[in-house]
């Protein structure tokens, strides 16, 4: 069976006003964040995830009272788990954000775990390539017509795989090796990630404007389908608005 994956991308401009759309626990968490980098990442990630989950389960995406009923909780590993009205939403999910833009992917396919990662096409140093990539991946970067794109893509697919494994960067990035496939479907190109202990995680990647997005799964998945077309990522400008006002404006006075 091939898993079905849907995805949504949203930016800081899509974050609803106020905090009515956040659950009480999320409002509390937001209030304890000192810096705007953390709070803006939290808000864009939560808004995107809640709207993705709402679309996946057939709820409206623009009603703050509905959105507050949707929560992303975390397993002890740090992996996200979607809940609606305090009950598991019957979906596996993964979230990622970069430069004021977020992506959330979900799958209703039972037994399939997903991981996604959003990156910019940016320069990577020789030290980055030597430290984080396997020898075979380093050769792929050296032979690539666009080494920066390839290095970021390999990194993105690794992060996606490490989210499927639920270890994140606790695990050596060289213990999962990325190989690119030839198949291209609906703007997605095939890839596979091979963990050192055996097995294979299939996935897909795409370049959308200045962003790279990878999606990796624990089993075969069809190319991810956007909940919205155009998906918005291709025309999104990377920004870092927190730099203009570094303190979280929603911080609870007196919190440490
Ligand atoms: C998973 C990880 C690589 C992602 O880091 P990143 O590239 O900076 O951030 P991204 O925006 O791509 O992804 C963030 C999302 O990863 C998800 N995530 C975090 N830990 C995860 C795990 N163990 N497994 C799967 N997903 C995980 C979360 O959903 C998080 O978003 P949220 O907090 O808004 O729900 C990183 O958080 C990590 O290594 N975590 C595990 C180790 C750890 O806890 N380190 C503490 C800080 S060093």
Image (cartoon, rainbow, N blue to C red):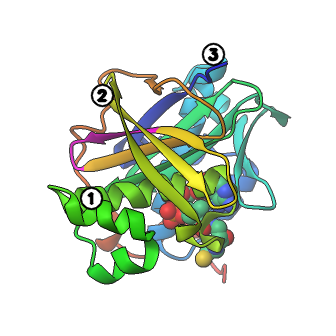
Report the image quarter containing ligand 1.
bottom right
Residue sitting at x 65%, y 49%: 164
- Asked if 168 appears above or below 92 in the picture, the reply is below
Is 143 included in the stretch rendered in magenta? no
Give the CA distance from mark 2 to mark 1. 24 Å
Residue 211 pos. (x, y %):
29, 49
Label number found at residue 145: none
Residue carrying label 3 = 58
Question: Which quarter shows the N terminus?
Answer: top right
Q: What's the magenta region? A: 204-210
Q: According to the image, label 1 marks what residue? A: 239
Can residue 240 be seen here? The reply is no
Q: Quadrant of the C terminus?
A: bottom right
Identify the residue under disc 2: 187
Q: Secondary structure at mark 3?
A: loop
Q: Residues within 10 Å of mark 1 (few under 14, many from 20)?
A: few
Distance Cα–Cα, label 1 vs label 3: 31 Å
Give the label, 2 or 1, closer to the camera: 2
């Amino acid at each position: 069976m091939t898993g079905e994956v849907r995805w949504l991308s949203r930016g800081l401009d899509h974050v609803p006003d106020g905090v009515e759309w956040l659950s009480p626990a999320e409002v509390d968490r937001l209030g304890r964040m000192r810096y705007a980098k953390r709070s803006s990442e939290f808000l864009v990630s939560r808004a995107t995830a809640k709207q993705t989950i709402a679309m996946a389960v057939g709820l409206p995406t623009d009603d703050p009272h509905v959105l507050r009923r949707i929560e992303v909780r975390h397993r002890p590993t740090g992996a996200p788990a979607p809940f609606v009205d305090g009950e598991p939403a019957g979906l596996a999910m993964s979230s990622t954000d970069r430069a004021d833009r977020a992506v959330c992917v979900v799958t209703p396919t039972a037994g399939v775990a997903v991981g996604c990662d959003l990156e910019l096409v940016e320069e990577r140093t020789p030290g980055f390539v030597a430290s984080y990539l396997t020898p075979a991946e380093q050769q792929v970067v050296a032979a690539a017509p666009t080494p920066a794109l390839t290095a970021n893509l390999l990194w993105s697919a690794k992060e996606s795989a490490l989210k499927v494994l639920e270890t994140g960067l606790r695990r050596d990035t060289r213990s999962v090796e990325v190989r690119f496939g030839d198949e291209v479907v609906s703007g997605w190109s095939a890839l596979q990630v091979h963990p050192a202990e055996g097995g294979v995680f299939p996935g897909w990647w795409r370049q959308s404007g200045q962003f790279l997005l990878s999606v990796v799964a624990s089993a075969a998945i069809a190319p991810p389908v956007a909940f919205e077309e155009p998906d918005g990522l291709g025309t999104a400008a990377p920004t870092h608005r927190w730099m203009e006002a570094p303190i979280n404006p929603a911080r609870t006075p007196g919190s440490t």
